[in-house]
Amino acid sequence: AKAALNAYRGKPTETADGDRVLLVANIGNPDDATGAIEHDAEGVGLFRSEFLFMDAKELPSEEDQFKAYQKVALKMKDQPVIIRTLDVGGDKEIPYLDLKKEENPFMGYRAVRYCLSNPEQYKVQLRALLRASAFGDIKIMVPLVTCLEEIRSVKELVEECKKELDAEGVKYNPDIEVGTMIETPAASLIADDLAAECDFFSIGTNDLIGYTMCADRGNDAIAYLYSVYNPAVLRSIKRIVECGNEAGIMVGMCGEAAADPLLIPMLISFGLGEYSVSAPSVLKTRKTISEWTKAEADALAEKVMRLKTAEEVKDALAEAAK
Ligand code: PEP
Ligand code: MG
């Protein structure tokens, strides 16, 4: 199987009828970029920057962050590198931030909410990202967005940082893209409005499934609910891709579901433009995408979107799988 997958090395990622998509990798630290390159990814679709913070004993300085982001940018040469700003809270604890214990951490003070209420601290990360953007195709991605004001506030902070860097004579990419993760039902419901103010979307199915189904992935008693095949989740994904495509922005997916061979024909039909998967899944994902024509994927999606339960959906997708 491995030899067969090697045939997909160096090949473009495209459907059987030649629709090109972008196939990139998720990484957790700068050294992982090596694995992304070894597995023939076409860039980085999600650098989870929280690992820089979790591995440290105190807040990483602007210089430390700059070096880490620059390292990834340089390794990936001219390929796109999407770096997600700090996604703290929920299951991601950072002891030195001294956050209060919450009754309901997944619905609490986390990710962009935490960052926006600590703007000076957030600007350290944004400045580091801007400085690193002079060395590669870095894009900034915001986690756990639920309303337009959050994206607007992040973009204002980015503009403030640009002015500071201008005054200091420091180089950065003035056209750096700022996009958002779509991983909450609220973001999905306002995806049309978000698309008008974002440069790209990346669908975080890991959280989107959990928040849509009100089901914690770690809880065995309700594990049966945690599935991307639920009609509610599929409709949400379809809507997000359509809103993004209508606005002419890139829509990707960086949750685990992007590498699910059963789901891939649905994503092809919806019109997903970028698949971000773990490095070892890159070639397999390229192969699965190459096995479907758009017309075949559309026919399957047409049928599947009318099914009523996750079980029916999964069975239909399994039956259709190549
Ligand atoms: C997601 O929620 O799908 C995602 C990619 O982010 P994380 O798994 O880091 O929460
Ligand atoms: Mg997430």
Image: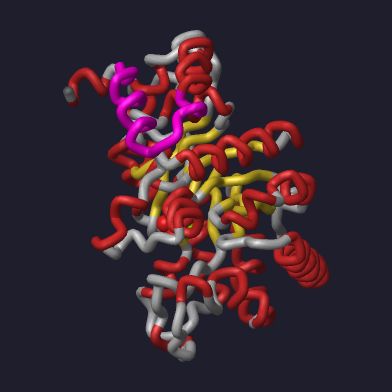
Residue drawn at the location 41% of the way across and 22% of the way down: 289
Can you say which quadrant of the picture contains the C terminus? top left
- Find residue 25 and report its horizontal and vertical position in percent: 42, 42
Instruction: Indicate whether 251 appears above or below 97.
Output: above
- Relative placement, left or right, of 169 versus 38 is right
Residue drawn at the location 37% of the way across and 36% of the way down: 259
- Res 165 visible: no
Q: Is residue 102 magenta?
A: no
Seen from the viewer's position, the closer of residues 192 and 43 is: 192
Seen from the viewer's position, the closer of residues 129 and 276 is: 276
- Relative placement, left or right, of 305 versus 256 is right
Seen from the viewer's position, the closer of residues 172 and 213 is: 213
Instruction: Indicate whether 178 appears above or below 286.
Output: below
Residue drawn at the location 55% of the way across and 31% of the way down: 272
Main secondary-structure element of the magenta-colored stretch: helix
Residue drawn at the location 64% of the way across and 82% of the way down: 118
- Find residue 231 and report its horizontal and vertical position in percent: 48, 39
- Relative placement, left or right, of 138 versus 266 is right
Instruction: Indicate whether 315 appears above or below 204.
Output: above
Q: Is residue 311 magenta?
A: yes
Q: Which residues are magenta?
A: 304-322
What's the colour scheme?
Answer: secondary structure
- Find residue 22 and report its horizontal and vertical position in percent: 52, 31
The answer to which quarter of the image holds residue 239 is top right
